[in-house]
Structures are given as C-alpha cells and as structure tokens.
Amino acid sequence: MSPNRTPSAGLAIFGEGEHNTVAYLGADPISNEMKLSLRSKSKTDKRKVSMSIDENGGRFDSNNKMGENVVRIAVGSDGGGHLDKIDKFGYVK
C-alpha cells in the first residue's frame, strides 16, 4: 500500500496527517488479500513489515529504511514455501 493511498475497508491508524498510514488491518482492494501492515511514522524512514493472506496462501514482507524489500516468506497454493533474502546490493539468496 502506498503511503498516499487510504485503505477502503479495514482499520487504519494514521501518523502525522491523514495520508500517513502507520498501521492497517483489513482487506486490500487491489490484491484481494487480508493484510496487516505496519510502517514507520517518519516521512523519510520507509521501514515496513506486512503480512497477508489470500485464497492461494500467505506472505510476510519486510522493507528496510530505504523502502527496499529485504525478506519475503511465502506459502503457495500448492502448500510449498518460499524464502527470499535480499542483500543491500539487490542479490537474492
């Protein structure tokens, strides 16, 4: 969820200003997932963690201070799992 998009359904907690969502629990209308998302309240610090569930499985994502995804853990519709660790140079391990 972009910091400037207000969720259409669910519980949102705003930081400084109504367009700065720091926590959200509810449905994401774009991806059709149930989502729990927490982000830094700082406008320059883009750290974020999110956990989501849809009809195919679940996912956990973590972003660093620059907003880059560094860890992704997912469960697919076939029951298999997937783990991505991304270092500061963008390499996936």
Image (cartoon, grey):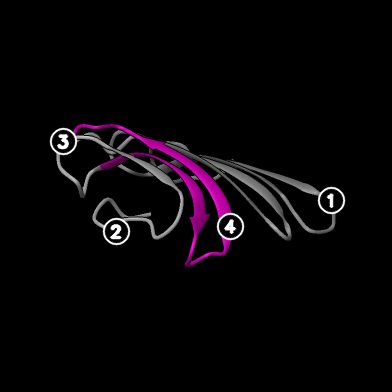
Residue receiving disc 1:
79
The CA span between labels 2 and 4 is 16 Å
Tag in front: 1 or 3: 3
The CA span between labels 2 and 1 is 32 Å
Of the image marks 1 and 3, the number of the one nearer the N terminus: 3
In this picture, which residue range is highlighted in magenta?
21-43
Q: Position of residue 63 (x, y in %)?
A: 41, 39
SS of the residue at dot 4? strand
Predominant SS of the magenta segment:
strand
State the residue in front, 55 or 14.
14
Of the image marks 2 and 4, the number of the one nearer the N terminus: 2
Q: Is residue 63 visible in this depiction of the protein?
A: no
In the picture, the disc for residue 16 is: 3
Residue receiving disc 4:
33
Residue 27 within the segment the image draws in magenta: yes
Tag in front: 4 or 1: 4
Q: Amino acid at mark 2?
A: Arg
Badge 2 vs badge 1, beta-carbon distance below 8 Å: no
Badge 3 vs badge 2, beta-carbon distance below 8 Å: no
Left or right side of 55 for 35: left
Of the image marks 3 and 4, the number of the one nearer the N terminus: 3
The CA span between labels 3 and 2 is 15 Å
Count neighbours of disc 4 (C-alpha within 10 A) and say few if under 14, some if 14 to 19, many if 20 or more.
some
In the picture, the disc for residue 19 is: none
Q: Residue furthest right?
A: 78
